[in-house]
Amino acid sequence: MERIPPHVLLGAYTEGVFPMADEGEILWFAPMLRGMIPLDDRFHIPHGLQRKLRKEPYEVRVNTAFDEVIANCSERDETWIDDVISRSYSHLHELGYCHSFESWDEDGLQGGLYGVAIGKAFFGESMFSRKTDASKVALVFLVEWLREHSFVLLDTQWMTDHLRQFGGIEVPREEYNKLLAEALAEDAEGG
């Protein structure tokens, strides 16, 4: 498989399903508990990061190095991002559905994240850091960007301790599906 067809990938997201690669096979997931970062006042920036943000350690850019971001996200000992996943999301980026948020400094790209935007929902896929807090700064910028663009859902798929420090929560699949339907309907209504 060269890549997952965009209509299959986008359709899966609208149904609350996402892919991950495992030893050359594409597996599809819809967790019983779904990770989310609230876009309201429950979003929390840890105090140490707040201090760092005041110093503006990174310039955050959007969509200037998508392929570099996904390549860095895949460079882990254990990864679910293989060539099929990379090509699939790069194609979604070309179509305007997938976006990267990148932290840059004088030495270049230091961290970032990428994800899929459909309607008023953003599905965070992966993040990486070369320098301390670079991915966290990109995440804070992402939340601000989503708020400015009236998004109502930031899906993180799974919950981690890293995401909990930002106010990340888990919701049961049934509740998640309702929130997802609302985010997709709101866009269809021009909300």
Image: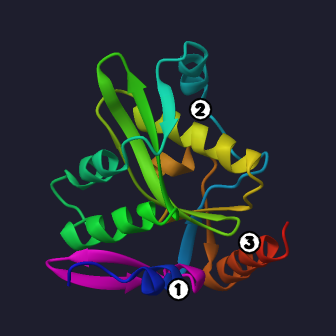
Q: Nearer the viewer, residue 179 or 84?
A: 84
Circle 1 is placed at which residue position? 11
Between circles 3 and 2, the one closer to the viewer is 3
Circle 2 is placed at which residue position? 46
191 falls in the magenta region: no
Instruction: Characterize the local packing of mark 3: few (<14), some (14-19) or many (20 or more) Cα atoms within 10 angstroms.
Output: many
**Which residues are the magenta region?**
13-31
Q: Amino acid at mark 3?
A: Ala
Instruction: Characterize the local packing of mark 1: few (<14), some (14-19) or many (20 or more) Cα atoms within 10 angstroms.
Output: few
Say whether disc 1 or disc 2 marks the residue closer to the N-terminus.
1
Residue 162 in picture, x, y percent from top left: 46, 46
Verify CB contact (< 8 Å) between mark 3 and mark 1.
no
Relative to 149, is 156 above or below? below
Q: What residue do we see at 50% from left, 31% from top? A: 60
Relative to 45, is 121 above or below? below
Circle 3 is placed at which residue position? 183
Residue 16 in picture, x, y percent from top left: 56, 81
How far apart in space, not on screen, are marks 1 and 2 (Cα)?
35 Å
Looking at the image, residue 101 sits to the left or right of residue 168; the answer is: left
Between circles 1 and 2, the one closer to the viewer is 1
